[in-house]
Amino acid sequence: MIVCSNRQLLVILFLVGFVGGVLGIWYWENHYLTFNEAAAKAHCEAICIAAGKYYDKFDTHAKLEQLIDVGFLDKSFAEKEVGGYRFEFQDKGCSCTARPVVPGETGSKIFSSWYLGYGVETIVEKIVYVDNGEDALLKTSTEQLKKSKVTSHMEEGIKTGENLLYCSTFQLAWNELKDTIVKEDIRFVDELQIVEFLNKNLSTKEDISEDAYVAMAGMNRDGILSKINRALKSKFKDHAPTVNTTFNYPEDILVYSFLFKNLKFENDFESLKNPVEFESSDSSVKVKAFGIEKYHKLNLNHLKLIRQLDIVDYISENDFVIGLKSKVPNDEIILAKIAPQKTLLETIDSVMERVKNNKPGIFHEDDTLKIPKMNFDIMHAYNQLYGKYLQNEGFEKYFIGGAVQNIRFSMNEKGVVLKSSSSLLVTLGRGAFEHVPINMIFDKPFLIYLKEKDAKFPYFAMWVDNAELMVKE
């Protein structure tokens, strides 16, 4: 018989209550929605249902205004912001995304919904605050951007005046669908160029450390959603997003990938007081920057900062390659102010060749380093895949119900942070020289890529051709 004093009993009851409260809060945050969140989810799904209904009836996609005009939606749905949430409707994919206007205050979850023919599928992702101490200044979808494009592969052509972003998460998700589920190249009735490039498996898990990503695919009947969330929580702990969706059939397939890189500098570079005037083909925009305003060897802080800088190859003020060192020695941060090649991959290859064949230069008195700050969170839907039926044997009844990628990127004096996720819903249906003070100012188009040292290809690359994604002055 165990005997407890009143004091011991009170301590036990307190501990039980405390643990229960913590678990309750965790469960509530991860499984329940606030009033604003529930309303945003319902709003998103209502738009998708109306878009699907219109498509089924008229065999064509409709803008939001058209859905209202024909009476499928109330006039209130014309508002872009409702109840603390901002809504982004993509008519071609019958999809809608809801993001909180002020994350943490008006909502802590992002809702992505698609019309799948038989109903609406919604993925709920909990917002994770992992960046350089500030929220994204630019949160949008690619449909709202006029000079920036997200690509699923590195063989995309570079166009004058257009930013081109690549992150390997969508390729990782595609690889999972291809290698784990279908077990051969993905085929559709229509021959799509994007599918041809994705089936090459140009970027794979071999390019990324095991501790930096999760990539999984499976069927509803096998508990794939729980497996994904357990893997995310196990690997990324408090930094893990929460993936949630409602399945309609046991055979529904969910493919998901998540990549997280936190490349902080040992010492903060200078946040420059004067802006950089970034020149693109058709404009000149003043943007915020970081780096070293003017190097002085007697400045102790500057001595620390140049240890974080590699001058890989400097030819002129408009042709140079540098590397920035973070606390993660296995990851390279390469920036190259160069003339681009035809494609993003050819441009990356040309810079990697310069990195491989040249020895680092030296930062001298009065030299300058200025790098534009970036801070964005972009969602992209691969609408060209939407509704396409697979032609692989045994999967003829399956079609792509949703193909979405999110890229959260921050670069400033503190470091570089990248967080990206991708999901697929597959349902039944960069020498020596005589020194003069040099200016390494990224004020014209340049390339940036993040790559693990022994990897064949980068996990993130961006050709920067305009200031649309930079932090404006």
Image (tube, grey):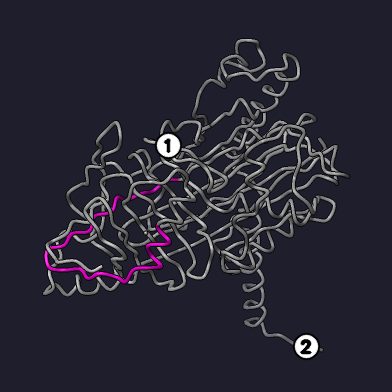
Name the residue: 20% across, 54% down. Answer: 272
Q: Position of residue 185 (x, y in %)?
A: 75, 48
Q: Label 2 belongs to which residue?
A: 2
- Which image quarter: residue 466? top left
Q: Residue furthest top?
A: 70
Q: Which residues are magenta?
A: 351-376
Q: Quadrant of the C terminus?
A: top left
Mark 2 or mark 1, earlier in chain: 2
Identify the disc placed on residue 222. Answer: none
Residue type at tag 2:
Ile
Does the segment drawn in magenta span residue 79? no
Foreground residue among 27 and 121: 121
Q: Of helix, strand and loop, which one carries label 2?
A: loop
Name the residue: 32% across, 59% down. Answer: 321
Q: Is residue 251 left or right of residue 119?
A: right
Question: Taking 419 as reference, is 97 above or below it?
Answer: above
State how far apart marks 2 and 1 are (Cα): 77 Å
Q: Residues within 10 Å of mark 1 (few under 14, many from 20)?
A: some
Q: Quadrant of the N terminus?
A: bottom right
Which is in the foreground here, disc 2 or disc 1? 1
Name the residue: 38% across, 60% down. Answer: 334
Q: Position of residue 25 (x, y in %)?
A: 61, 58
Q: Is residue 219 left or right of residue 358?
A: right
Q: Label 1 belongs to which residue?
A: 159
Residue type at tag 1:
Lys
Foreground residue among 230 and 387: 387
Q: Position of residue 116 (x, y in %)?
A: 74, 32
